Amino acid sequence: MSNSTTLKVVSVVISAFAIVQMALAGDPDILSDFIGPINGMIPDGNFFTYTGFRVLVGQNSPPSTFKVLKATMAEFPALNGQSVSYAVLQFPANTINPPHTHPRSAELLFVAQGSLQVGFVDTTNKLFTQSLQAGDMFVFPKGLVHFQHNADASKPALAISSFASANSGTVSLPNTLFNTSIDDTVLALSFKTNVATIQTLKKGFAP
Ligand SMILES: *[C@@H]1O[C@H](CO)[C@@H](O)[C@H](O)[C@H]1NC(C)=O
């Protein structure tokens, strides 16, 4: 083979490998159709049904603060091994879902009601933002820091998010940094401020 032919073969092999890697970007494949109940019971249709979102239908008293209803494998065990999950996000007027990441999945958000200001920051520290209205969809790439804000002063917003993992995980930046026992000095140096400022920030998370 000539050098250029060898190069072409190598690049085809590399891109084929990259495509396979992309196809494997969800949870690991399981070697059965599904993973049944852990108590060993024979599953029926009920096992594959989640009714935790019924509370949203004809809801008379919407929440007073930002609220997430989840259907991950923790709430809905039939999702174990299926690489999918859901969340319903309810935003009263003027509320936020603070900056956070999902380490194991991208997030595909659909705005069902109201409007949302959303954004994420990529690994080069570039911010991408958008104003979404009802009917719009937005994708937050896997693992990147992102947020959603209902900036409307009077109208609530409702969004539905789907994930390509049964357990995508959530790392909330405010909670991770200021509601754990990371040393005040470490945080003060990291944020180029003093310990007193860090302690003020931590107070907002105290029970
Ligand atoms: C702080 O962490 C505790 C323990 O994990 C948790 O119960 C509480 O909700 C957190 N506070 C806030 C404001 O997120």
Image: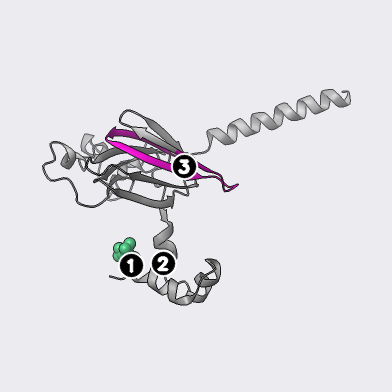
Q: Which residue is labeled 1 in the image?
A: 204
| Residue 91 position in % (x across, y down) | 27, 45
Residues at marks 3 and 2, CA–CA distance in whole angstroms = 30 Å
Q: Which residue is labeled 2 in the image?
A: 178
Given residues 85 and 45, the one toward you in this image is 85
Question: Does the numbered disc 2 mark a residue whose Cβ is under 8 Å from ligand 1?
Answer: no
Regarding mark 3 in the picture, which secondary structure is present there?
A: loop
- For residue 21, side relative to residue 78 (left or right): right
Given residues 86 and 175, the one toward you in this image is 175
Using the image, tell me which numbered label, if any, was put on residue 27.
3
Residue plotted at (31% across, 71% down): 206
Query: In which quadrant will I find the N terminus?
Result: top right
Question: Does the numbered disc 1 mark a residue whose Cβ is under 8 Å from ligand 1?
Answer: yes
Q: Which residues are magenta?
A: 106-129
The secondary structure that dominates the magenta segment is strand
**In contact (CB < 8 Å): disc 2 and disc 1:** yes
Please identify, in this view, whether the residue under mark 2 or under mark 1 is nearer the observer: 1
Regarding mark 2 in the picture, which secondary structure is present there?
A: helix
